[in-house]
Image (tube, helix red, strand yellow):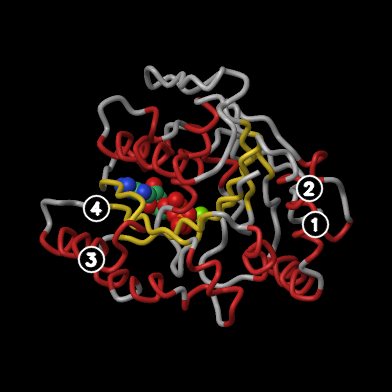
Amino acid sequence: MPLVAVVSPKGGVGKTTLTASVAALFAARGHEVVGLDLDPQNALRVHLGLPVMEEEEGFVTGLADGGSWRGALRGTAYGVSLLPHGAADPHEVLDLTRLLLDRPEALAEPVREMLADPRRIVIADCPPGPSPALSAILPMVDTAVVVLLADGGSATLIPQVADGRFLGRGTLAARAAERAALVLNQVDLGQPLSAAVLDVAGTIMGARLLGVVARDPGVAEALADRRLPVELPGSRAAEDLSLLAGSLLGRLSIPPAAALGGRAVLTDWGLRR
Ligand SMILES: Nc1ncnc2c1ncn2[C@@H]1O[C@H](COP(=O)(O)OP(=O)(O)O)[C@@H](O)[C@H]1O
Ligand SMILES: [Mg+2]
């Protein structure tokens, strides 16, 4: 039932990294999870271990043809069901943008169908900034996880996250903004600027500061190694990501993980099934 949208006014802040890790951690706790890639970069599939070179037909790229979302689902080694965006060249991206501006229902309708199952958690990796894809699903979003970096450029954007300006104008955006929570990524407490941005985020966002993820060179290495950061033993980012997944789960109203009787199975870092 719940829809989580991972969003940001900026690109390159860790949206896809966080989406993949949180989705895998939810699945490891026995929840049914759909990872929905709405970003034309089509990168969520790679983070979730699908082959880099073999690109299958995607869910978003197939929207114009009205194909079924179930037909676009791909299994992953982490137990997350993936709806890849699909590979799209710049012309196709513009065509998809136009399609979603003209007919937001083309995306909203299948997402509504996905959410009809109360046990299913859908977590959407959104493109940076405003997008017609985000606008189409916004009324259904339970929690918008807004990702920013702990740097100066991001600090100036925190007030826009707090009052929801970056989600757009009007009552609908204001309603969605109430359900937005901030995650500060790449925090390095040894660096005064990073620590200061974290303080500012805490002051402005209060309880809506959902989580903090440490800067960890292992995160990029894990991707190169075809693993998730949460699979790195002893990594600070891995511990933070696990805490983030727990906090996020606490915000969502979902039945206990049915398949596993509600017990968490994450006793070690072995997430793969
Ligand atoms: N906590 C972290 N520590 C170090 N590097 C990180 C961290 N989170 C993300 N990265 C790196 O930052 C880059 C951008 O991450 P990505 O998830 O692709 O961002 P986005 O989806 O917002 O564009 C990647 O190279 C990733 O490995
Ligand atoms: Mg991304």
User: Mark 4 to mark 2: distance in Å?
Assistant: 37 Å
Q: Position of residue 188 (x, y in %)?
A: 19, 51
- Toward which corner of the image does residue 171 lie, by quadrant? bottom right
Q: Amino acid at mark 1?
A: Glu
Q: Are marks 2 and 3 in contact (CB under 8 Å)?
A: no
- Label 4 or label 3, whichever lies nearer to me, is 3
Q: Disc 4 or 2, which lies upstream in sequence? A: 2
Residue at mark 3:
203
User: Mark 4 to mark 3: distance in Å?
Assistant: 16 Å
Q: Disc 1 or 3, which lies upstream in sequence? A: 1
Could you say whether the residue bearing mark 3 is in a helix, strand or loop?
A: helix
- Toward which corner of the image does residue 50 lie, by quadrant? top right
Q: Name the residue furthest bottom.
A: 169
Q: Amino acid at mark 3?
A: Thr
User: Mark 1 to mark 2: distance in Å?
Assistant: 6 Å
User: Mark 2 to mark 3: distance in Å?
Assistant: 38 Å
Q: Are marks 1 and 2 in contact (CB under 8 Å)?
A: yes
Residue at mark 2:
113
Asked whether mark 1 and ligand 2 are closer than 8 Å, the reply comes as no
Residue at mark 1:
109
Q: Amino acid at mark 2?
A: Glu
Residue closest to the eye, 206 or 25:
206
Asked whether mark 4 and ligand 1 are closer than 8 Å, the reply comes as yes
Q: Position of residue 37 (x, y in %)?
A: 63, 50
User: In the picture, which quadrant includes the C terminus?
Assistant: top right
